[in-house]
Image: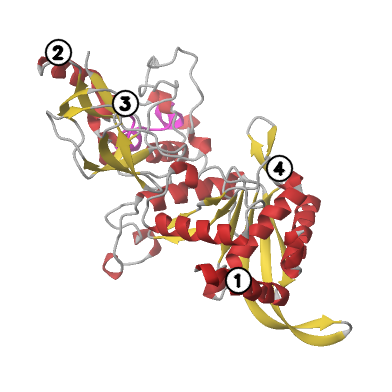
Amino acid sequence: MSIEILMPALSPTMEEGTLAKWHVKEGDTVESGMVLAEIETDKATMEVEAVDEGVIGKILVADGTEAVKVNAVIAILLEEGEDESALSAAADGAGSGSAKGEDSKKSEEGDAAKPKSADPAPSAGKAGTAPASGGETDSGDRIKASPLARRIAADKGLDLKSIDGSGPYGRIVKRDVEKAQPASQASSSATQTTSDAPAAKPVDMDDPLAAYGIARDRYELEKADGITKISAKRLSESFRDIPHFPLTVDCRIDALMDFRKRVNAAAEKDGDKVSVNDILIKACGLALKKVPAANSSWIEGGMIARHKHADVSMAVAIEGGLITPIITDADRKGLVQISRESKDLATRARDRKLKPEEFQGGTFSLSNLGMFGIDSFASIINPPQGMIMSIGAGEQRTVVKDGALAIATVMTVTLTCDHRVVDGATGAKWLQAFKTYVEDPMTMLM
């Protein structure tokens, strides 16, 4: 029996990807472990290996195809003894999977994140069965509708169950919702809504800023890449759904700068150089161990995960957005080892060569914009982590020392906390521990 090769989910957040390059062609014999293709995800480019043996009978998704949905059929593998006659049945069985994201490409809204309030209530029927009227449901018993269609329906007060979808496989798309009328208007004029506010109009992608009075010839449109789209979606959800608050403190770092010089005097003999950020990663790891209640994640359903390891994600700027490779067990590693790992991870992050486990699963994040001259800022939490630290620039400031004015190098840091797992007192205790390590770095060696 022929085998369907599916678009893999290479990370928990991956919904679609780009099939960058095939390493095989139709008619090639493949063995288990052989590299079949390169997939560009929201964070990296990774190779996909064959699990089964056989002959590539048909490639359904060409090189360079974007927005290929996870679990879409991308190729057909013929087993021993099968010939091309098995392809037609296999291709028919591929269904929407071999459509290469056709419905998402045809819909005008692309990959806009759908508001939770627009999700229809689950129907009472069995999974996969169609409702009595309206668009077809997916296997989760939710009505198939594009994000823009859901948004327009919510604005117009429409019930998606009453709308017939004209998109691929019964999906409700923009044109279906625009043609439909709210039930209050369809029944009779006596039951019309009293609001005079017009329904929100969908964005015209040919002239998206027209509503703001900005002429089309005064800007250029650029398509967001996968990283930017996924980051926009996740950060929007994080800012909207996580009850967060900031805590800010100033740290004097003259002792840290002197400590770094002494460390590098020894490390440079072996070609290593420890950065301020490497020392801060170490300090964050130790503080997470000293205040374990802060090293936590909220789990939907009323559970809290208390992490046993201090895995610090460091924000790295790459083309198109940010990625957060992880220094695992940061509290246990020496500064030279942290320096080597951080340089290697940052380099491979920019080349999009990180493995999924190298940027997924951290328990805490650190973002440092001090090198850009930013005095202070607050970052958006990277779920499911409970905290993220924002590092500002170290600069000379006037301080009071022993009752007299003095000059010190001061760095402002801001800790953004998820109030569901880290309250103000816990966050303050963590900041006290962090500040102690920073202002007296010799304590990190104790």
Residue sitting farthest toward the right: 403
- Give how far apart the Cα atoms at labels 2 and 3 are: 18 Å
The location of residue 260, given as percent across then percent down, is 64, 72
Question: In the rendered structure, which disc, 1 or 3, sits on the residue that comes first in sequence?
Answer: 3
Q: Horizontal placement of 381 versus 98: left or right?
A: right
Q: Residues within 10 Å of mark 1 (few under 14, many from 20)?
A: few
Residue 283 drawn above or below residue 48: below
Which amino acid type is shown beneath numbered disc 3? Answer: Val
Within the magenta stretch, is there residue 174? Answer: yes
The location of residue 294, given as percent across then percent down, is 73, 47
| Disc 1 target residue | 266
Instruction: Considering the whole magenta stretch, tell me its main secondary structure.
Output: helix
Q: Secondary structure at mark 1?
A: helix
Q: Secondary structure at mark 2?
A: loop
Looking at the rendered image, the disc whose residue lies closer to the viewer, 1 or 2, is: 1
The location of residue 406, given as percent across then percent down, is 79, 86
Within the magenta stretch, is there residue 261? Answer: no
Check contact, mark 3 vs mark 4: CB within 8 A.
Answer: no
Name the residue at 71% across, 54% down.
Answer: 286
Looking at the rendered image, the disc whose residue lies closer to the viewer, 1 or 3, is: 1
Name the residue at 44% across, 28% down.
Answer: 159
Label of residue 420 in the image: 4
- Give how far apart the Cα atoms at labels 1 and 2 are: 65 Å
| Disc 2 target residue | 81
Residue 382 drawn above or below residue 397: above
Which amino acid type is shown beneath numbered disc 1? Answer: Ala
- Give how far apart the Cα atoms at labels 4 and 1 are: 44 Å
Which amino acid type is shown beneath numbered disc 2? Answer: Gly
| Disc 3 target residue | 51
Question: In the rendered structure, which disc, 4 or 1, sits on the residue that comes first in sequence?
Answer: 1
Q: Which residues are magenta?
A: 170-187
